[in-house]
Image (spheres, grey):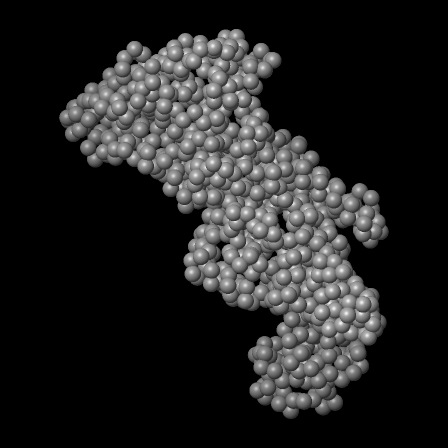
């Protein structure tokens, strides 16, 4: 290995032609040994600006995140640190990044996911384990199509139907490439140690092949079927959506709700009561959807309801279709609810659909895909569904059949993608039979093969999987994986649906299924629908590892970390399909984090103006620039004018002075300082800025340590273990506290309780090193030739260096920068980068632990705090008073008199066994049960 020597004053590099050691180089106070293999030496030496050069080579006066975070990422990537180390001996640690949607840019929720995963990846890498962490992006079928359609309309006033399928898909790919570049840059800026050589997109060739294979295998296993069934339909998206993409809005009584496409709010939360006529008697029914009465094909009553005993098997007259419909008896009817008579609309209600099948009722669809009444509705044909509600009630009233309207609590089904009121429409769709796969997924948790953290989510897991319904995977979209299913017809008129890779494969499979020759297959047409986005996403853990071909040794994954809000959208489906298609669980553990809220505990929303992007916090942003962001969202059609106004007002209130620059490391540390397992966490911008100041504290401490080593270069060759007996009590104390810090950091990382790790790091670095031990070292280093100075200098370097290693997964940029600045001891591991250096181990530090000494010094620190407090109370902060310590532990305090005097700024510190004579002429404060400190009154 070649070494260069850097001269501080000139900033030039000189090759040392001799075999030099750390010891001989460090003797010169103005030169520093530079490892040639660490590229920072070239980076520093090639800086042309004089000011920059002085800051780089002479160490900047203060921490500047824009400088520290500029170049390290590219170097890490070029060094290959993000790829699994083939020589690493530990167990493989593997993850995939939950692929962000290419609908836009990353928000703080993404930053939390990314930071948690990166901390874990860096920690395992420093433990000597081969780490693979695969990035990717999701095509997000519905969400991306919607946003591109809005953009197309806003910019060109064109719909996708007007420009045609192929041109629209070109527009979507253009959007994808732009957003993917933006997202990729955001992920890099966050310092994520992702293996970019393995980056995936859910619609690239490899993923598309996996999707096709998965569909065919599920079809062949009898787990896929096509059926005419009721689906959740969004009239705005003109597509089916899954059950878990439906959100229910609960309302108590009559409430007006904004519905997309309607200029005025639509009323919900009331019963309309109207009569169905018989010659001898009327039946009054109640409904919240009077507009669907045009599709009624029966009226149901409870078989034991005495009011309607005489009507069993009879008929009523439908006033609009002018035909009779049957009265049926079924126990599903609650006789105490409403009038006890229920209208049955099989084509637009899932319960009614099952009842209709049971009793052989007609299924009469009356609502179109666009949300209009169809031709079956006579004079109401073409009317929008909620406009028809008013017209039908008016018509019933004119016929004398309307019996009233009363308030009623109810739940409104809303599309989570579009905000539209969901309709249930009868459609031929593809479904996944989930029952057996769900049972296996529950068994995996029951048997302990799959664990959920927090464990409280196990109950939710079982409830959801127990009640699971078959999964509708058809989507009536243009953007997505076209369903690999073909309808094949024979010359004789028979037909079948087949899952196949292409038409030739479909022809062969259909011929085998129908028992005919391939030449008999006369017509083949492919399903025009696309698959639900979550179908391809559910394959991600194994498709990125090479499935359906041989999967790599990194599968199954070690961990799946994501937000609890997509536990069933994504995680459960990965478990079901992974187990079914690969024969094993896709991962062994699920770690779930909560959602990010603003400082007031509100969920972040563009319309509230409280959405903050990671780069805004990292680089800082003015209020005007924040306003420009929401204005841009409005111009792109993502926000309405009312939402724009609300967002601008929210930003002005939350960020009146904009957002100050905090840097990547401060953002990461702040995110990890929250208990991420909470259901939700409030992000505190002030705390993030405080963590930037913490970074500067670390910077200044490092600067001081380098100065100490310049004064006492022999410290680099000092072995603390061999010289243990010569260490001072404060040297041993900080090493004991270092052992505690290492233990706590390891405990926090092992259990994914990152707030425990960050708290231990902050306490050790900020309070124990910087505020106390570093200050006490100044007394010792006044005599740099003394052995005590050498030992304290070496202890200080060791404590700070260990803290930086433990801090590295959380603050990778700052710790990398300081790692290359700090002098190396003779027994240093000399890793090229801190990110591949050994992580501090509890067992290597536990021999330094001394809890008795920790308690002793803790009392001294409390005493110092008490004296400072009394000085403030007495108004003598700028003076040097005499402090009196009344204690029964005189011997202990005598060992620290100089430290107490120095750190409190007192002229003298006196020890007393009794404070009787001080009682009336001093202010005092108790320090535990054995000690009281006094400051004389002025």
Can residue 737 be seen in this snapshot?
Answer: yes
Left/right placement of residue 565 relative to residue 142 reads left
Tag count = 0
Does residue 624 sit above or below 699 in this rendering?
below
Does residue 275 sit above or below 84 in this rendering?
below
Does residue 884 sit above or below 926 in this rendering?
above
Left/right placement of residue 469 relative to residue 517 reads left
Can residue 389 be seen in this snapshot?
Answer: no
The residue shown at (56%, 50%) is 551
From the top left corner, tell me how far across and down residue 582 is, in percent: 55, 57
From the top left corner, tell me how far across and down residue 373 is, in percent: 79, 67
From the top left corner, tell me how far across and down residue 184 is, in percent: 63, 37
The residue shown at (74%, 69%) is 511
From the top left corner, tell me how far across and down residue 289 is, in percent: 69, 69
Left/right placement of residue 82 relative to residue 230 reads left
The residue shown at (43%, 13%) is 19
Q: Front-most of 628 and 916? A: 628
Question: Splitting the image into 4 quarters, where does residue 605 fall?
Answer: top right
Does residue 58 sit above or below 502 in this rendering?
above
Q: The C terminus is located in which quarter?
A: top left
Q: Front-most of 102 and 873? A: 102
Q: Front-most of 622 and 724? A: 724
The residue shown at (64%, 39%) is 183
């Amino acid at each position: 290995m070649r070494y260069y020597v850097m001269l501080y004053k000139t900033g030039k590099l000189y090759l040392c032609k001799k075999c030099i050691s750390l010891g001989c180089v460090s003797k010169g106070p103005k030169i520093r040994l530079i490892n040639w293999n660490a590229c920072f030496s070239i980076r520093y030496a090639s800086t042309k600006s004089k000011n920059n050069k002085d800051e780089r080579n002479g160490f900047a006066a203060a921490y500047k995140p824009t400088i520290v975070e500029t170049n390290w990422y590219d170097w890490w990537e070029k060094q290959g640190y993000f790829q699994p180390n083939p020589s690493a001996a530990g167990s493989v640690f593997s993850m995939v990044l939950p692929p962000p949607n290419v609908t836009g840019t990353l928000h703080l929720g993404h930053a939390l996911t990314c930071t948690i995963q990166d901390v874990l990846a860096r920690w395992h890498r420093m433990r000597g384990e081969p780490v693979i962490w695969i990035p990717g992006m999701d095509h997000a079928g519905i969400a991306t199509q919607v946003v591109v359609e809005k953009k197309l309309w806003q910019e060109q006033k064109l719909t996708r139907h007007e420009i045609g399928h192929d041109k629209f898909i070109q527009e979507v790919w253009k959007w994808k490439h732009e957003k993917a570049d933006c997202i990729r840059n955001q992920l890099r800026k966050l310092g994520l140690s992702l293996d970019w050589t393995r980056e995936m997109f859910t619609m690239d060739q490899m993923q598309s092949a996996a999707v096709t294979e998965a569909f065919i295998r599920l079809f062949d296993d009898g787990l896929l079927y096509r059926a005419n069934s009721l689906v959740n339909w969004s009239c705005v998206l003109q597509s089916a959506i899954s059950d878990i993409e439906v959100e229910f809005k609960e309302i108590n009584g009559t409430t007006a709700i904004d519905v997309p496409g309607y200029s005025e709010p639509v009323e919900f939360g009331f019963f309309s009561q109207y009569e169905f006529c018989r010659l001898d008697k009327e039946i009054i029914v109640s409904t919240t959807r009077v507009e669907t009465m045009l599709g009624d094909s029966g009226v149901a009553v409870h078989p034991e309801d005495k009011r309607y005993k005489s009507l069993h098997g009879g008929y009523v007259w439908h006033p609009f279709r002018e035909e009779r419909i049957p009265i049926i008896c079924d126990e599903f009817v609650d006789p105490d609810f409403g009038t006890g008579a229920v209208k049955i609309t099989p084509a637009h209600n899932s319960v009614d659909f099952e009842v209709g099948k049971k009793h052989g009722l007609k299924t009469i669809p009356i609502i179109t895909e666009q949300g209009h009444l169809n031709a079956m509705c006579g004079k109401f044909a073409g009317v929008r569904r909620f406009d028809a509600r008013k017209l039908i009630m008016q018509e019933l009233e004119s016929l004398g059949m309307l019996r009233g309207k009363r308030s009623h609590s109810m739940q409104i089904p809303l599309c989570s993608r579009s905000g539209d009121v969901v309709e249930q429409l009868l459609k031929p769709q593809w479904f996944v039979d989930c029952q057996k796969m769900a049972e296996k997924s529950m068994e995996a948790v029951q048997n302990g093969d799959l664990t959920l953290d927090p464990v409280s989510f196990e109950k939710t897991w079982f409830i959801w999987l127990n009640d699971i319904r078959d999964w509708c995977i058809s989507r009536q979209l243009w953007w997505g994986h076209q369903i690999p299913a073909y309808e094949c017809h024979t010359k004789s008129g028979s037909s079948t649906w087949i899952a196949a890779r292409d038409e030739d494969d479909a022809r062969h499979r259909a011929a085998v299924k129908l028992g005919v020759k391939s030449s008999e297959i006369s017509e083949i047409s492919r399903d025009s629908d696309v698959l639900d986005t979550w179908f391809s996403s559910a394959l991600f853990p194994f498709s990125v590892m090479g499935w359906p071909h041989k999967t790599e040794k990194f599968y199954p994954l070690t961990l799946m970390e994501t937000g609890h809000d997509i536990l069933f959208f994504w995680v459960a489906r990965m478990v079901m399909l992974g187990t079914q298609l690969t024969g094993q669980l896709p991962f062994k553990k699920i770690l779930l984090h909560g959602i990010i809220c603003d400082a007031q505990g509100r969920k972040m929303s563009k319309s509230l103006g409280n959405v903050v992007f990671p780069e805004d916090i990292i680089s800082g942003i003015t209020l005007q620039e924040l306003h420009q962001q929401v204005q841009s969202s409005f111009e792109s059609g993502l926000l309405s004018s009312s939402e724009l106004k609300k967002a601008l007002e929210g930003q002005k209130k939350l960020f009146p002075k904009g957002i100050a620059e905090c840097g990547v490391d401060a953002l990461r540390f702040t995110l990890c300082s929250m208990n991420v397992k909470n259901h939700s966490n409030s992000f505190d911008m002030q705390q993030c800025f405080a963590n930037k100041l913490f970074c500067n504290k670390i910077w200044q401490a490092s600067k001081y340590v380098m100065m100490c080593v310049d004064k006492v270069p022999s410290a680099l060759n000092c072995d603390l273990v061999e010289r243990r007996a010569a260490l001072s009590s404060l040297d041993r104390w900080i090493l004991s506290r270092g052992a505690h810090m290492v233990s706590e950091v390891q405990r926090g990382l092992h259990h994914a309780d990152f707030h425990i790790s960050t708290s231990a790091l902050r306490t050790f670095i900020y309070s124990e090193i910087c505020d106390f031990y570093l200050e006490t070292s100044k007394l010792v280093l006044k005599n740099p030739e003394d052995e005590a100075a050498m030992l304290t200098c070496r202890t200080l370097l060791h404590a700070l260096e260990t803290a930086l290693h433990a801090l590295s997964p959380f603050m990778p940029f700052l710790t990398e920068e300081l790692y290359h600045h700090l002098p190396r001891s003779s027994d240093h591991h000399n890793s090229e980068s801190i990110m591949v250096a050994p992580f501090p181990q509890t067992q290597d530090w536990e021999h330094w632990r001394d809890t008795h000494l920790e308690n002793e010094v803790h009392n001294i620190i409390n005493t110092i705090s008490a004296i400072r407090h009394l000085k403030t109370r007495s108004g003598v902060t700028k003076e040097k008073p005499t402090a009196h310590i009344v204690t029964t532990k005189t011997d202990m305090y005598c060992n620290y008199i100089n430290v107490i005097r120095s750190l409190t700024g007192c002229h003298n510190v006196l020890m007393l066994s009794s404070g009787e004579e001080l009682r009336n002429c001093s202010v005092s404060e108790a320090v535990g049960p054995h000690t009281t400190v006094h400051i004389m009154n002025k």
